[in-house]
Amino acid sequence: MSHLIIKDLAYQYNGTKVLSELTLNVKQDEIVCLLGASGCGKTTTLKAIAGILQPSQGYMSIDSQVVNDNHHFIAPEKRNIGMMFQDYALFPHLTVSDNIAFGLSNMSKAQKRERVSEMLRLVKLDGCAKRYPHQLSGGQQQRVAIARALAYKPSLLLLDEPFSNIDTQVRFELIADIRRIIKDQQVSAVFVTHSKEEAFAFADTLAVMHGGKIAQQGTPEQLFSQPNSKEVAEFLGTGIYLTAKVLTPTEYETTYGVIHSLTESKHQGQHGVVYVRPHHIKLCEAEHGDVSSQAILNRRFIGTRYVYKVRIAGQELEVAAENDRVLAVEQPVKIKIMPHTVNFFED
Ligand SMILES: Nc1ncnc2c1ncn2[C@@H]1O[C@H](COP(=O)(O)OP(=O)(O)OP(=O)(O)O)[C@@H](O)[C@H]1O
C-alpha cells in the first residue's frame, strides 16, 4: 500500500508552469529522494505535499486521506507532516528539550517529558537537554531538528537539503544516523538533495525530476542499469553517445567495435544510440599514425590514479586509467569498451 500517492499534479508560479503531470508514490516506511537539476521543481513539490502551496490540478493522498483534489484542500497543519530543512530552523531562545517539545501541544506535561526523553535517547543527545542551539555543532543541531520533526509522530517526513550545511567529513555518518532514526520510527519520508552521493546513502528509491515531472522512480541500481530516458541517464553521471545498431540481444555495433551487453535487449535490428559511461571505457596505447586512434587532450592526477580527457565521437570525456603505465598528453590511444549493461535509446 502506498502511503503518499500523487497523481497528475500541476503548479504554476505567476503563469509559468513548474510542475505538470507529476506522479509519485511513496510506500509505507520508504525514503524517496527527489533528485534533479537546479530549478526543476523539487522544493515546489515538497511545498505542495506540505500544503504550503495549492496545486492548480491533481490528486494527493497521505495515509489514505485525500489532502488534495478538485474538491479538497487540507491545510498544512492538518496533514500531520514533519519537516526538516537545511538551516535547522531551531528556536535559538529555547533549550534542546523545549525545541523538541515545541509541537507537542496536545500532551500533558508528564507525557511531553516522556516523549522528549525518548527522542533525546533516539538521537543520542541525552546529555544536551539543557543546552541552547548555539552550544551545539551543526550535526547535533540537525539531530535536534529531526527529533523535533519526529516527536509528534508525523505520518510523513519532508526533508529539504538537510545535510548541505554539514561538514563533508561528518556528513555521511550523520546521514547513516538519521536514516537509522527514520527507519526506527517507521515513518515514510521524501527527501530533496542536489547530491547523488547523499541520495544513494540516504534513500531507498530515487525519483529523478525533469521538465516538472518525475522522469523515473526506482532504486539506484535500476536507474543506472535501465534509465528510461537520456535525461535520467545523463543526470546519473557523465558519458558519451555512440550511434549503434543492435546486432543480437547482447551485441551492439558501433564505430568503436562491437559492445557486449551483460543483459539482453528487446531492440534487435534497431538503430539508435548507446550511452557509455567512463568506467566502461579502457584506454590502450596506440601507434602514431593509427587512423582509428585519438590523442589525449589533457590529464590530471587525483591521488590514486590519473584521469585523462579524450575526445570520442566528437564528445569530450574524462576517463580514469590504472597507474601501471602513465600516458602522456597528446599520446595516441585506442578506445576499448568493456562488456557492461548497455543503455540503448532507439532513434
Ligand atoms: N516564489 C516563486 N515565484 C516565482 N517563481 C518561483 C518561486 N519559487 C520558485 N520559483 C521558480 O520555480 C522553479 C522551481 O523552483 P524550485 O525551488 O522548486 O526548484 P528546485 O528544483 O528546488 O531548485 P534548487 O535545486 O535550485 O533548490 C524555478 O524556476 C524557480 O525559479
Image: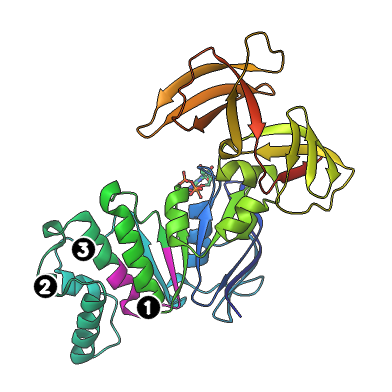
Tag 3: Cα neighbours inside 10 Å, few (<14), some, or many (≥20)?
some
The N terminus lies in quadrant: bottom right
The kind of residue on which mark 3 rests is Phe
Count the numbered circles shown: 3
191 w.r.t. 73: above or below: above
Residue 9 at x, y = what percent?
64, 61
User: In what element is the residue under mark 1?
Assistant: helix
Q: Mark number for residue 127?
A: 2
Q: Quadrant of residue 115?
A: bottom left
Q: What's the distance in space between the residues labelled 3 and 1, CA to CA?
A: 26 Å
The C terminus lies in quadrant: top right
Q: Which residue is mark 3?
A: 91
Residue 105 at x, y = what percent?
28, 82
Q: Residue at x 50, y 24 (%)?
A: 308
Q: What's the distance in space between the residues labelled 3 and 2, CA to CA?
A: 19 Å
Q: Which residues make up the magenta segment? A: 146-158
- Would residue 71 be visible to someone looking at this image? yes
Mark toward the viewer: 3 or 1: 1
Residue 59 at x, y = what percent?
64, 69
User: In what element is the residue under mark 3?
Assistant: loop
Q: Quadrant of residue 303?
A: top left
Q: Mark number for residue 184?
A: 1
Residue 152, magenta (yes or no): yes
